[in-house]
Image (cartoon, coloured by chain):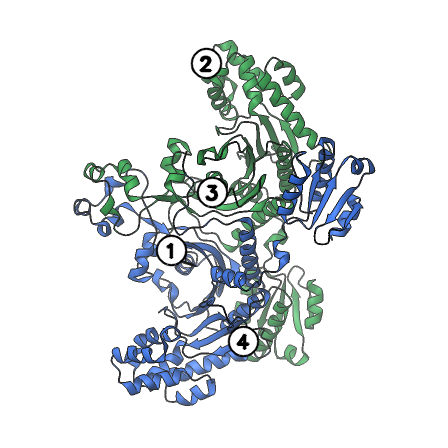
Chain colours: A green, B blue
Amino acid sequence: MSKPAIAKGTRDFLPSEVIKRNYIFDTIRSVFKTYGYLPIETPAIELLSTLTGKYGEEGDKLLFKILNNGDYLAKANPEALANKDSNKMLSSISKRGLRYDLTVPLARYVSMHQNDIQFPFKRYAIQPVWRADRPQKGRYQEFYQCDADMVGSESLMYEAELLQILDTVYQKLNIDTVIKLNNRKILQGIAEVSGQSENFMGITVAIDKLDKIGREKVAVELTNIGMDNEAANTILDLIEIKDINEIATKLSSSETGMLGVSEMNEVMDYMSDYTLNNKIEFDFTLARGLSYYTGCIIEVVADASSYPDLRMGSISGGGRYADLTAMFGLKDMSGVGVSFGAERIYDVMEECNLFPDSVMKSLDVFFVSFDPESHKYAYQQVSALRAKGVSADLYPEGAKMKKQMKYANGTGAPFVAVIGSDEVSAGVMAVKEMATGEQNNLTLEELLEKLK
Amino acid sequence: MSKPAIAKGTRDFLPSEVIKRNYIFDTIRSVFKTYGYLPIETPAIELLSTLTGKYGEEGDKLLFKILNNGDYLAKANPEALANKDSNKMLSSISKRGLRYDLTVPLARYVSMHQNDIQFPFKRYAIQPVWRADRPQKGRYQEFYQCDADMVGSESLMYEAELLQILDTVYQKLNIDTVIKLNNRKILQGIAEVSGQSENFMGITVAIDKLDKIGREKVAVELTNIGMDNEAANTILDLIEIKDINEIATKLSSSETGMLGVSEMNEVMDYMSDYTLNNKIEFDFTLARGLSYYTGCIIEVVADASSYPDLRMGSISGGGRYADLTAMFGLKDMSGVGVSFGAERIYDVMEECNLFPDSVMKSLDVFFVSFDPESHKYAYQQVSALRAKGVSADLYPEGAKMKKQMKYANGTGAPFVAVIGSDEVSAGVMAVKEMATGEQNNLTLEELLEKLK
């Protein structure tokens, strides 16, 4: 006998949790489909040669590595074995790992299947990923990502489309959000007009922390990477501007900065006819750490004015990357994508009570019966209902009515049908509406009508 | 730059493949729901202490093992390290592995969450599993299982219910099948009346091969496990009986055998009112290798009379197990379940052209445009259609019409809308129905009406 246990950082999901999670996934999927994104799937297991070096040194450490099958030590690096050098031995005993995100597999996929797909290629994927992070509240080693990406066009139409996808998904999920928008080229322009072009990467890293550590500490970080106080404050003043026209006047001397402004204006122009359901705002403090972004960057947070007590980071993010597939040899493929943080979206919806009651109803009607004869009769009614697509179930045997009713309650079915010998001889069922307690004798046809 | 490659035995799925696979999964899921089964999910990563020893020695070898993170050699068994003993070293450098099936995780789940769920517990799961089998045609290292199981009742109602689930799913998928039914107790009865009770496990192993190696070779196997020719032939004659009443007369001296017969009759009695869409037959040659089955056993094959050229093994299977959760300390939990072989179902549907055309339509309408102005106009139309839930898309920029039309064709959209300056000024779109070539100028409302 094994003591039942689960691996650290992983989770079992109860039915009620799966049903709510699927509600989120299904909502996102339906919007992706409406916008013409196609589903692809890549395997959980990838070659380590595909994964390693794509997520930085820290990422490499967080990859789950699969031990080669069979006598894996036979081909182990003898020197590493002698020195107990785990790092050095790794490639000789493990050639595969678990997917760390959906973006690198997308790049590999597009490179490998470039002749089977047409560009622009619009794909979505909703799949689990694995990271050997230290588990903590809200952080798991196995979790889902929900990504939509377009690869193969520079058109800013796709930025607009993805903003509308974000807006539509959050409307359907009934979460009020603020969709924040920036452009790497504007940040480059800000660095340029502040005379700090050579510090660009350092600037993005520093201002990425603004939310967390505040303006003063970011100013210190900026001076730490080699600029004086004045330049640091110039940059901080510029990124705190909220108005696109105001930033345009400040960046007029920077060609890159002005290109960023014109890109932002073109994206908004595409959306001029579209009625937003969420707030959308320019936020030049938005940097997003990922170094592969080159144009627009997007981040979504739950709207603090709707949920003042909620403490939650961004629930979606994305942006434009000029050359993602180059790492697998396919060049000049500009792409743009967004990713929904399903785990955090779940937490927001739970904390703020946003799941509609209707989501939780899995069973339409549950049957209980008094004796073997009425049980068989009940089975036939259930069977007839199921044939009509109604979700119906019954207690398996003539247990005590109290036990059966307790189980019926536990199913959450809105209707419970009670069958005894009277009902069998009359060809009806005593149907109780659980919300009101109202009870009626109904025929199968009448019950079907009521359930519609 | 990495050369893009995929791990042996794993697969990428193109959009058309994902769409067809999801059609199968969605069909199965909808029937599971109708029958009151609830979804659960367990993690891909399980402790090796949960998995090891549950699938036999061969199964242990086929488990994917995950290397411990960090300096895994620090805690490696020094003796095993010195002797390069892969087996002995394993537990000291790997404590987790990948899910091998959905049944052992179910048993672990039910044992761990016995206070969070109510019994009878009806769950379904549709998730990938991993086996380090040698890859070959139709056999992959990562593949999906689709299981429905009930745990916690001995009622034969559930056998009937699962047979109806099989029948309904295959009707919805439009695959003609033969659902074969047997009972381990009948096989025990056959062994008993042949005076071979002590050889029962050997008998099930031998007759499991009847389809593949034929009667004569099975007879040889039976004599090899210690019975004479006459006993072997008695057994073979008995299992080839097709009629439940005939087997009943032969087994009248075996209490266990007669219990099996009465179980089969009770299952069929539950279904007496149900109209079958597939063939169902008793098949006493059906043994199914899995040793944990104790009552009814079920296997489904595509109907050879409908698909004479098809060569395919069973596409579903299942049965009753008296004590599955005992391995995790929870005793006396009788269960019964079925599993759909989604990969083989896919192959059957592909080979026999059973996927409906409607499944493949992912986009309702695709837009092409002549110039920047009509492109922006087209974007607004597309945006308006998407807001109505119509799946619509457009080519991103004013490329050559030939290129745009080629792309439009590639999307498989049944309607293509062409926008030029004439259409913009008239406020219409030139909509071509791709199947007929018919073209009409339509307003947005007229197009919406046409798409209904």
Q: Say if residue A125 shows up in the picture.
A: yes
Mark 3 or 1, closer to the camera: 3
Residue indicated by mark 2: A223
Q: Earlier in the sequence, mark 1 or mark 4?
A: 1
Residue B430 is situated, as x and y percent measured from the top left of the image, at 77, 43
Q: Which residue is drawn at 53% across and 16% down?
A: A191
Report crowding for label 2: few under 14, some 14 to 19, many 20 or more residues within 10 A (C-alpha). some
CA–CA distance in space, label 3 to label 4: 44 Å
Are callouts 3 and 1 both on one chain? Answer: no
Dot 4 amino acid type: Lys
Q: Say if residue A1 shows up in the picture.
A: no
Of the numbered discs in the image, which one, if any, rests on residue A112? 3
Are callouts 3 and 2 both on one chain? Answer: yes
Decide which of B198, B16 is in the foreground and name it.
B16
Of the numbered discs in the image, which one, if any, rests on residue B135? 1
Are callouts 1 and 4 both on one chain? Answer: yes
CA–CA distance in space, label 1 to label 2: 57 Å
Marks 3/4 in contact by CB < 8 Å: the verdict is: no
Secondary structure at badge 4 equals strand
Are callouts 1 and 2 both on one chain? Answer: no
Report crowding for label 3: few under 14, some 14 to 19, many 20 or more residues within 10 A (C-alpha). some
Mark 1 or 4, closer to the camera: 1
Residue B175 is situated, as x and y percent measured from the top left of the image, at 56, 67
Report crowding for label 1: few under 14, some 14 to 19, many 20 or more residues within 10 A (C-alpha). few
Of the numbered discs in the image, which one, if any, rests on residue B279? 4
Marks 1/2 in contact by CB < 8 Å: the verdict is: no
